[in-house]
Image (cartoon, rainbow, N blue to C red):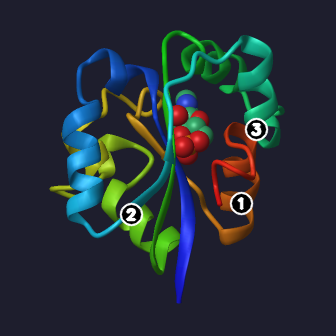
Amino acid sequence: PTNRTFTMIKPDAVADGFTGPIIQQIEAAGFKIIALKKVQLSSEEAGKFYAVHAERPFFQSLCDYMCSGAIIPLVLEKENAVEDFRQLIGATNPAQAAEGTIRKQFARSLESNAIHGSDSDENAAIEGAFFFTEKELA
Ligand code: CMP
């Protein structure tokens, strides 16, 4: 069934000028853009978005990184969106990501890994609602 996922192009990839090539590959893979914007997160907002990781040793560094520059959040639609998008972006660590995946091509490191992809339909809805209004997602 057609469903939605949520993604963010992260500060490293935006700063490196990879927004265009990444969006091109997302669309070429059959994802339809439902919503898109450019945002500068505050440290507090980054902490709220990544609250599930609050106890992880990398949490503070992750929050600093995620508010170090602009990000581009998007909501996408496709058949089997969550799973297919995670295939498209590849493993969290770009050193372990498959050839041709977005992280393999564009990420700098495990932390600065270019792009986010929701891990479930439920989290896709929660994460999309963090950045976009109901009207923007209609
Ligand atoms: P993502 O899986 O999209 O969401 C959690 C993020 O935390 C992850 O991408 C990386 O940016 C970062 N991350 C995950 N694991 C580590 C780690 N071991 N060290 C540093 N950053 C990490």
Q: 98 or 27, which is in the foreground?
A: 27
In percent of the image, x 40 and y 43: which residue is there? 93
Which amino acid type corresponds to the residue marked 1 in the rendered image?
Answer: Ala
Q: Specify the label residue 44 is tagged with.
A: none
The residue type indicated by label 2 comes to Lys
Mark carried by residue 125 = 1
How far apart are labels 3 and 1 at the CA level? 18 Å
Please tell me whether mark 3 sits on a helix, a strand or a loop.
Answer: helix
**Vertical position of residue 68 compared to residue 76: above or below:** above
Identify the residue at horizontal 39%, vertical 54% (top origin).
91
Q: Residue at left 23%, top 35%?
A: 20
**Residue 34 image offset from top left, x and y in percent:** 50, 56
Picture disc at residue 32: 2
Residue bearing mark 3? 53
Q: Quick check: 88 left or right of 122?
A: left
x, y percentage for residue 29? Answer: 25, 66
Left or right placement of residue 38 versus residue 58 in this view: left
Amino acid tagged 3:
His
At a point 40% along the width and 72% down the height, the residue shown is 84
Which quadrant does ligand 1 occupy? top right
Labels 3 & 1 near each other (Cβ < 8 A): no
**Quadrant assignment for the C terminus:** bottom right
The response on whether ligand 1 sits within 8 Å of label 2 is no
Q: Going from the N terminus, do you reach mark 2 or mark 3 first?
A: 2
Neighbour tally class for label 2: few under 14, some 14-19, many 20 plus, Cα within 10 Å? some
Q: Nearer the viewer, mark 3 or mark 1?
A: 1
Q: CA distance from mark 2 to mark 1?
A: 16 Å
Label 3 beta carbon less than 8 Å to ligand 1: yes
The answer to whether mark 2 and mark 1 are in CB contact below 8 A is no
Label 2: which secondary element = strand
Badge 1, how many Cα within 10 Å: few under 14, some, many 20+? Answer: some
Q: Nearer the viewer, mark 2 or mark 3?
A: 2
